[in-house]
């Protein structure tokens, strides 16, 4: 069975502490100044893969389908957000999105991965981790009674790891890096309670690409609480001498938020 869980190595703990530290600073600032709005959101639901191709090293390894080992899902997931709006125009959002897929299957052919060769048709355990931590700045350039549009930029910290284990052979590839993204936000206020929302971040370059796009229907329960349902897609990867990996994920999401 494929499982999506959050691991806690030292690196993840350090980044997580920094993430929580920034949230505490934002909260302290909001309470002390009472200027601006602080929002916490929790997103959950089901996630599944439609693609996860791997070749490591990127120039000499063997391309294989990670889904042959981990399966495609769907499984449960969770994302956490903290947003501080300084005023109606400017805001910062922090995102914590852990993701890990694990399972056992067989490779269809002899596969070179890192410094080892894995045999076909033998039980092989695969682990795919893609935890991300993101800081997004948004500038709202248009706001009317019905419409709101914003643009901005984001910095994504990528903590990725791919592991293959077959008998006594155990090989892993780690990838830690920072990726810049562009941000687009659009909301249409259908009624006083219902809104339709587009929330997208992404960027493409010759070395790779990353896109995270969500479509949501949001219901305002009261002045503080709201809930959303929708669809999210995450697609992208890298193609260089060290790593080739492209994945496409789909999310059926439920979200709850609180603003104060």
Image (tube, grey):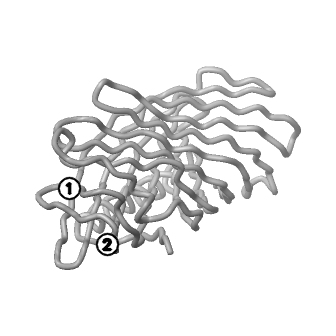
Task: Where is residue 7? Give x, y as percent.
Answer: 36, 71
Splitting the image into 4 quarters, where does residue 199 fall?
Answer: top right
User: Any mark on residue 122, and which?
Assistant: 2
Whether label 1 touches label 2, CB < 8 Å: no
Q: Is residue 131 left or right of residue 81?
A: left
Residue drawn at 70 percent across, 38 percent down: 197
Q: Is residue 234 above or below residue 28?
A: above
Residue drawn at 48 percent across, 57 percent down: 27
Q: Is residue 32 above or below residue 143?
A: below
Residue drawn at 55 percent across, 41 percent down: 85
- Disc nearer the start of the sequence (1/2): 1
- In this view of the protein, which residue sits in the foreground, 94 or 33? 94
Structural crowding at the residue carrying mark 2, measured as other residues with C-alpha within 10 Å and reported as few (<14), some (14–19) or many (≥20) = some
Task: Where is residue 150? Give x, y as percent.
Answer: 58, 27
Badge 1 marks a residue whose secondary structure is strand
User: Any mark on residue 113, and which?
Assistant: 1
Residue sitting at the far right = 191
């Amino acid at each position: 069975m494929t499982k999506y869980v959050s691991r806690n190595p030292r690196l993840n703990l350090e980044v997580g502490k920094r993430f929580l530290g920034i949230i505490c600073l934002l909260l302290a600032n909001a309470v002390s100044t009472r200027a601006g709005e602080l929002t916490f959101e929790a997103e959950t639901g089901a996630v599944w893969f439609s693609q996860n191709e791997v070749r490591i090293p990127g120039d000499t390894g063997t391309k294989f389908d990670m889904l042959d080992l981990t399966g495609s899902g769907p499984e449960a997931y969770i994302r956490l957000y903290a947003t501080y709006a300084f005023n109606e125009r400017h805001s910062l959002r922090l995102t914590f999105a852990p993701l890990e897929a694990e399972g056992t299957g067989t490779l269809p052919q002899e596969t070179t991965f890192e410094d080892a060769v894995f045999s076909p048709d033998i039980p092989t355990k695969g682990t795919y981790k893609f935890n991300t931590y993101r800081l997004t700045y948004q500038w709202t350039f248009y706001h009317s009674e019905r419409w709101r549009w914003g643009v901005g930029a984001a910095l994504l910290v990528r903590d990725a790891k791919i592991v293959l284990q077959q008998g006594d052979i155990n090989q892993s590839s780690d990838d830690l890096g920072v990726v810049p993204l562009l941000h687009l936000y659009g909301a249409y206020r259908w009624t006083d309670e219902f809104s339709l929302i587009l929330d997208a971040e992404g960027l493409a370059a010759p070395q790779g690409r990353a896109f995270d796009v969500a479509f949501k229907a949001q219901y305002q329960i009261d002045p503080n609480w709201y809930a959303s349902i929708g669809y999210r897609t995450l697609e992208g990867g890298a193609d260089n001498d060290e790593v080739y990996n492209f994945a496409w994920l789909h999310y059926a999401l439920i979200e709850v938020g609180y603003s104060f």
